[in-house]
Amino acid sequence: MRKTIPLYFLLLLLFLNIVGCVFVLGGAAGALGAYGISKDTVQAETDKPYDALWNSALTVARIRGTIKQEDSQRGYIELNVESGHVWIRLIRLTQATTRIRISARRYHLPNLDLAQDMFVKIMEEAK
């Protein structure tokens, strides 16, 4: 019986790793829910205005790294952070809802921690 419990635990961890869509943050700073949609991307829908999120994303991007490309009409920011690369995408879903998607890679490898950190900072800044 004792050997089956660790086996079930390992199978659960393997299943969560394969699925890849694990709930990351719930209700943080006005978000309706943030999900890790891949090994390097965090996505959330929020009720914060698009302009507030855009200004917040620009502010956080300028503080954290060097902006390589920005386009407010497309809602796209690309920047270098430390030894990594971050892409921020804002998409207007409705007048009241905006989707924010942040992808991050460091040394060409997925970096979900950096994406989550950028997400939290942007949501906190967009108050």
Image (spheres, rainbow, N blue to C red):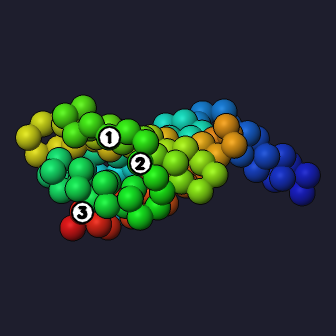
Q: Nearer the viewer, residue 72 or 110?
A: 72
> Which residue is labeled 1 in the image?
70
Specify which label sits upstream in the sequence, 3 or 2.
2
**Is the Cβ of the residue at disc 1 closer than 8 Å to that at disc 2?**
yes
Residue occupying the point 24% across, 50% down: 54
- At which x and y percent is residue 93? 19, 34
Q: Nearer the viewer, residue 87 or 35?
A: 87
Q: Amino acid at mark 1?
A: Glu
Quick check: 45 left or right of 43?
A: left
Q: Position of residue 46 (x, y in %)?
A: 24, 50
Real-space Cα separation, disc 3 to disc 2, in angstroms:
19 Å
The residue lying at 32 percent from left, 67 percent from top is 124
Q: Secondary structure at mark 2?
A: strand
Tag 3: amino acid:
Ala
Near mark 1 (Cα within 10 A), the count class, few <14, some 14-19 or many ≥20, is: some
Whether 50 is drawn above or below 14: the answer is below
The residue that appears at 48% across and 57% down in the rendered structure is 65
Q: Which mark is residue 67?
A: 2
